[in-house]
Image (cartoon, grey):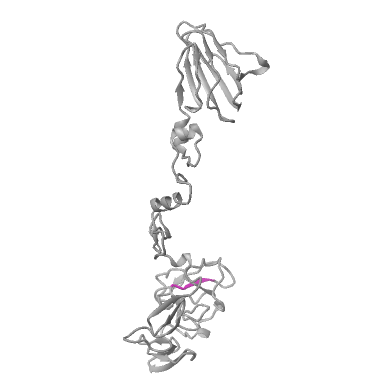
Amino acid sequence: MPDMFVMPFRPAYDSNGRFAPGAQAWFTLSETNTPYPVFVDELLSEEQPNPLVADGLGKFPRSYLDPSVDYRCRVYVADAVVGIDDPLADHDYDPYVPSDMGATGPRGPSAIVIDPVVPTTTLAPGTPASASAAPMGAGVYRISLGIPQGAPGTSGALGDGVYGDITVSGTGTVLTVGAAKITLAKQANLAANSIIGNNTGSAATPIALTVAQVKTMLGGLGTAAALAEATVANYRQADADTVLTSDIAWSAAATVVLTPGTNVAVNMDLGFNFSLAMGGNYTLSNPTNTKDGQSGLIYIVQDGTGSRTLAYGTAWKFEGGVDPVLSTAANSVDVLQYQVRSSGFIVASLAKNFG
């Protein structure tokens, strides 16, 4: 006949001796980490979840064990990863022997049931907490608790004393949260895309700040554009105190059309990549607004006539000090590759005849 799962005490407690809501009991084969199920009914026809999860008072649901196997049972806190994190102290039972834990069968006399009515008594400050069990018959026990709460408050207020993270004083009128008690884990349900803070300019209760409020606060720290998103022009001009996004970077790389003429101006504040349609014999002037390290391409396209020539300003430096000659075929495309070493030294090379 299947044995009933019974903890050596009910309910589960954490390392501080407090109820362990949501505690997890993980069942495996003895001396292994191989999970093995426990069951909802004594016929072993329906498996319980494994790990088994306790309720808000640390009490596990009634479960039945397969008598044909030796179990190992480990109890963890609610947010632990079973099999990875350490179980609660003294909560690794291997083998788990039901008869040692107070269970002799599905309805055996040692399968203790706790009366849901739990009387409590307020004790004087400094008095240790107490608990007692009184048999009520038919295997039911009533637990009585003594809880030290300090002096009672007025008008139903909470009595002075220490309640975990909170200290009550002033006859129940002042609640003080202990130092370092507000952890990230306790700030549940924080509004999406928000940061806790105070944007009023004076002492105030913290609120969940929006992204816009955080940007405004950072802007007031001395760099008004600290979080301003860069525009295409900002990026091409190397403007300070802007944040570059990927879409702007790609937009800034778009090809900019140069104005044809006897002397072709190249303003490097206007782009990285350029194109020039040849309609005569031109000179590519020294670029303006260069930035050291700037690089890019200039597409040079012959017109339908072809054989147009291109001379270069003194800042354009080619291999061997020899200016290259354009492809002569009508509508041919050459590509001038460049990188700025300094305003008077533009390293360049010409790849020809892309058709």
Residue 71 at x, y percent in the picture: 53, 74
- Relative to 273, is 134 on the left or the right? left
Q: Quadrant of residue 57?
A: bottom left
Residue 4 at x, y percent in the picture: 45, 80
Give the residue drawn at x 49%, y 31%: 236
- Relative to 141, is 36 on the left or the right? right
Residue 345 at x, y percent in the picture: 62, 23
Q: Please, which residue is most extreme toward the right here?
A: 320
Q: Quadrant of residue 203?
A: bottom left
- Relative to 124, is 346 on the left or the right? right
Asked whether residue 62 is in view, the answer is: no
Residue range highlighted in magenta? 22-28
- Residue 219 among magenta residues: no
Front-most of residues 207 and 337: 207
Asked whether residue 251 is in view, the answer is: yes
In the displayed structure, would residue 8 be above or below residue 247? below
Give the residue drawn at x 50%, y 39%: 240
Residue 192 at x, y percent in the picture: 39, 56
In the displayed structure, would residue 149 be above or below residue 278? below
Give the residue drawn at x 36%, y 85%: 116
In the displayed structure, would residue 47 be above or below residue 351? below
User: Where does the N terminus fall, quadrant-wise?
Assistant: bottom left
Front-most of residues 198 and 63: 198
In the displayed structure, would residue 4 be above or below residue 292? below
Overall secondary structure of the magenta section: strand
